[in-house]
């Protein structure tokens, strides 16, 4: 039942808060009515800005299922995923997401998710990007294709 799984995501978030690991973000991943991955924000614990609750839960689910492909899974998270987490969710092939708070709610408690969304709209100057050594990188890609390596 979705509400029960969201309760588990909330418990994860409280565990992270109580432990001082990071923000109020918890997540569980469910497959076939069983929780296969859990995570909460561990940015402060691990000194790593990529350790959001969703990313931690994705890593846990991938480890537990022995696969990078989480097709058929559902994700329950205490807040609408940030762009990084949304990218991880899409790369993991998770197609159903349930969230509690909205981006505007995270903004109210001084998390800056909205600034990242503005980058995609060209309305922010948080970073600059410039093409560099494209020909060499294209050769790298060609060499990779020649190896016949498995795509994922």
Image (cartoon, rainbow, N blue to C red):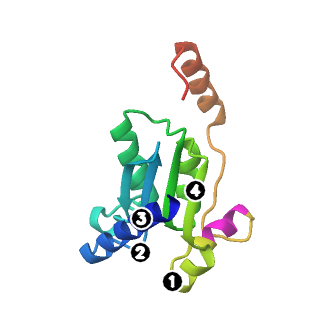
Helix, strand or loop at label 2? It is loop
| The one of 144 and 21 positioned closer to us in this rendering | 21
Residue mark closest to the camera, 3 vs 1 = 3
Of callouts 1 and 4, the N-terminal one: 4
| Residue 110: in magenta span | no
Q: In percent of the image, x 38 and y 36: which residue is there?
A: 65
Of callouts 2 and 3, the N-terminal one: 3
Of callouts 4 and 2, the N-terminal one: 2
| Residue 116: in magenta span | yes
Residue hosting label 1? 110
Residue mark closest to the camera, 4 vs 2 = 4
Residue range (magenta): 115-120
Q: Are marks 2 and 3 in contact (CB under 8 Å)?
A: no
Q: Distance between the residues labelled 4 and 2?
A: 18 Å
The circle drawn on residue 16 is none
Residue hosting label 3? 9
Give the residue furthest to the bottom.
Answer: 108
| Above-or-below relation of 110 to 14 | below
| The one of 13 and 86 positioned closer to us in this rendering | 13
Q: Is residue 141 something one can see in this rendering? A: yes
The circle drawn on residue 97 is 4
Residue mark closest to the camera, 1 vs 4 = 4
Residue 4 horizontal/vertical position (percent): 44, 63
Q: Is residue 52 something one can see in this rendering? A: no
Residue 145 horizontal/vertical position (percent): 59, 19
């Amino acid at each position: 039942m979705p509400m029960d799984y969201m309760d588990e995501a909330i418990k994860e978030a409280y565990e992270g808060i109580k432990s001082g690991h990071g923000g109020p973000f918890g997540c569980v991943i469910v497959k076939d009515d069983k929780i296969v991955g859990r995570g909460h924000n561990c940015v402060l614990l691990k000194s790593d800005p990529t350790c959001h609750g969703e990313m931690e839960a994705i890593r846990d689910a991938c480890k537990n299922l022995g696969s990078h492909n989480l097709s058929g899974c559902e994700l329950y998270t205490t807040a609408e995923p940030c762009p990084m987490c949304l990218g991880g969710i899409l790369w993991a092939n998770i197609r159903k997401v349930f969230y509690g708070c909205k981006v505007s709610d995270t903004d109210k408690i001084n998390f800056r998710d909205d600034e990242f969304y503005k980058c995609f709209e060209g309305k922010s100057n948080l970073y600059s990007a410039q093409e560099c050594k494209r020909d060499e990188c294209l050769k790298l890609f060609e060499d990779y294709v020649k190896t016949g390596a498995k795509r994922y």
